[in-house]
Amino acid sequence: MSPQNIYILGIESSCDDTAAAIIHNGKILSNVVASQKIHEEFGGVVPELASRAHQQNIVPVVHQALKKAGISKDQLHAIAFTRGPGLMGSLLVGTSFAKSLAYGLNIPLIDVNHMQAHILAHFIDEEGFEKPSFPFIAMTISGGHTQIVEVKSHFDMTVIGETIDDAVGEAYDKSGKILGLGYPAGPEIDKRAQKGNPKAYQFTKPKVDGLNFSFSGLKTAILYFVQRKVKANPNFIEENLNDICASIQYTIIGILIEKLKLATKQTGIKQIAIGGGVSANSGIRQALKDGEQKFGWTTYVPKFEFTTDNAAMIAIVGYLKYLEGDFAEQDVMASARLKI
Ligand code: KG4
Ligand code: ZN
């Protein structure tokens, strides 16, 4: 078997998406995601329900990924799975499934760090998307994570900043909850922000040293602001929703860009790649583009389906590790707090 002809199955089950993808060399042949709607009515992910849904979804999702790729499981060279970080019950479903399948097929098992995968998603072969060259700065922004990482090579990465409380997506979702929006609120705040005045209201930015982030104070500031305004005018939210959303977005993007500026200054690296669900945000995309003009940055935003939680990013890491012969043993354990 030549190294030019490798098929790998990637499995992702760290949070509330059950996903499977097939990669052929560096190219994705199929990328299937079963998103769990059940959490919407609770306004956030319920871990116990997530594990149960993974258990229900994993076999059909893997089956569909193979079918869409047009290959049979006997053609697979290895199984890559998310080992962590994430919700333990959810991780256990993917881990156990991957182990059993690799054992049954007698092929290598490859453990993948979910946070590394968000970054390495940039190395999927995709027409119209350039791969960053090393070294670069990666910023992963989603409902579960907010990190700035210095990436020296595929597997030599150092976290140089991260949130000390809420993730940036959580800041969006919690602000949305205060405003009575559905979950997840990020996309709707983004949509409304584009129709509002970003300078209508000012929210104080949290003061956190260095490259770390804090978003819980912002959420509290928004809560008190809304409570005060609603007391004076019960229709305040409905009458000013677009402006409120635009002001929240302006504040959040301002925080992210400030930290990126500091990161480029500290490291001397001007290549920036982003990943995670919040990289779909129109404000951050525009701000990065502006940064190319203003600060001489080169920026990379992956294809949308590779930014939110997905298995294509697990499969690409599986492929890169396969090439290095970096395999896991059958006694590998899921790890909820796995670090980069
Ligand atoms: O990566 P993801 O699908 O799942 C994890 O949390 O790992 O990210 C979901 C998060 C949610 O918090 C959602 O509100 C946020 O990404 N999000 C957005 C946008 N699209 C998704 N936040 C701001 N603007 C968006 N356009
Ligand atoms: Zn993620």
Image (tube, rainbow, N blue to C red):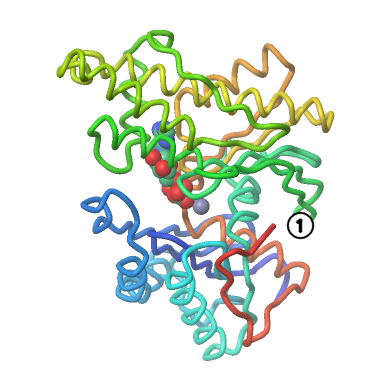
* Nearer the observer, 282 or 71: 282
**Which residue shows up at 81% across the image and 46% down it?**
152
- Vertical side of 103 occupied by 45: above or below: above
Whole-percent x, y for residue 167 in the image: 51, 43
Question: Count of labels shown?
Answer: 1
**The C terminus, quarter of image:** bottom right
- Vertical side of 93 occupied by 12: above or below: above
Q: Is mark 1 within 8 Å of ligand 2?
A: no
* Nearer the observer, 330 or 234: 234
Locate residue 25 relative to residue 133 in the image: left or right.
left
Q: Residues within 10 Å of mark 1 (few under 14, many from 20)?
A: few
User: Where ligand 1 lies, by image quadrant?
Assistant: top left
Rendering quarter of residue 47: bottom left
Mark 1: secondary structure:
loop
Q: Name, please, the residue furthest toward the left.
A: 234
* Nearer the observer, 193 or 119: 193
- Vertical side of 137 occupied by 8: above or below: below
**Which residue shows up at 61% across the image and 36% down it?**
213
- Vertical side of 176 occupied by 239: above or below: above
Locate residue 334 relative to residue 152 in the image: left or right.
left
* Nearer the observer, 40 or 202: 202
**The N terminus, quarter of image:** bottom right
Q: Amino acid at mark 1?
A: Phe
Which residue does the numbered mark 1 point to in the structure image? 155
Whole-percent x, y for residue 75 in the image: 54, 78
Whole-percent x, y for residue 264 in the image: 76, 28
**Which residue shows up at 74% across the image and 67% down it?**
323
Locate residue 249 relative to residue 177 in the image: left or right.
right
Rendering quarter of residue 260: top right
Whole-percent x, y for residue 18 in the image: 39, 64
